[in-house]
Amino acid sequence: MVALNNIIWPLAAYLLGSIPFGLLMAKSRGVDLRQHGSGNIGATNVARTLGKSFGLMTLMADISKGLLPVLGCKFLGKDLMNVQFILSLTGLAAVAGHCFPVFLGFRGGKGVATAVGVFLGLCPKALAFAAAGFIAVVKVSGYVSLGSLSASAIMPALIHMFCPGHFVEPMAWSIAIIIWFRHQDNIRRLFSGQEKSWKKSGK
């Protein structure tokens, strides 16, 4: 029973993270999101393909995939043994589910919005500073991907500063590595000057 209680939150987080809300939203409009724009199933590509309102709905849904399991584990599983370890594993599992969803052959999104939900539930102060960095980088460069990479890169240091812990810090590093791994194509396009910019795509 103890082992089941320890695994149920990370498992639920992974399965919830695997639900491709952006893809489902686009399909409801008769659009295969993987055949449009960047081919990504996240909020940025939804916004480019279907408009800002659909992008915002996808963003909120993807954030909830990280926030809800973490809050559930935090408040309902607080009596579990090694709760901090289970909580960190739950956050990591939510991001892994979004990036490597079992329902899509383990080919999912970039993980940024889901990571936002995770850190909103675990360390909102660190998230606030990372969000400020994201906004500053996007405003100056015009590249959402560069803002996401920058925010994920500084998040482990912010976690160490505001919410240090033996388990949450490795989780932050693991999430950053996953996000950078899922942004490989963006990184190549940034270096080659082919990445899409919000500034150049028009207002």
Image (spheres, rainbow, N blue to C red):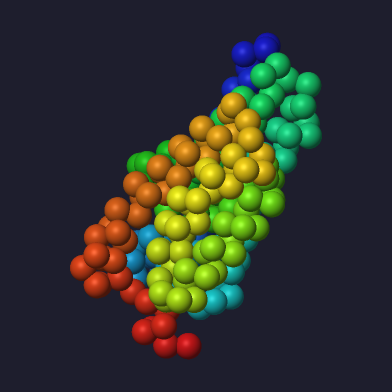
Image quarter in which the N terminus is found: top right
The x and y percentages for residue 183 are 35, 54
- Say if residue 173 shows up in the picture: yes
Which residue is painted at 50% across and 56% down in the image? 151
Foreground pick, 79 / 131: 131
Side of 3 where 174 appears, left or right: left
Q: Is residue 44 left or right of residue 194?
A: right
Which residue is most to the left?
192
Q: Residue at the location (69% across, 52% down)?
A: 125
* Residue 188 lies in quadrant: bottom left
Q: Residue at 58% of width from left, 28% of height from top?
A: 167
Q: Nearer the viewer, residue 145 or 36?
A: 145
Horizontal arrangement in the rendering, residue 142 relative to residue 134 (left or right): left
The structure residue drawn at horizontal position 40% and vertical position 71%, both measured from the top left corner, is 143
> Does residue 15 appear in this view?
no
In the depicted structure, whether residue 78 falls above or below residue 154:
above
- Residue extending farthest to the bottom is 203
Residue 175 x %, y %: 48, 42
Where is residue 193 shown, x and y percent of the image?
24, 72
Looking at the image, which is closer to me, 42 or 197? Answer: 197
Above or below residue 64? Residue 172 is above
Q: Position of residue 52 (x, y in %)?
A: 54, 76
**Image height of 203 relative to 134, above or below:** below
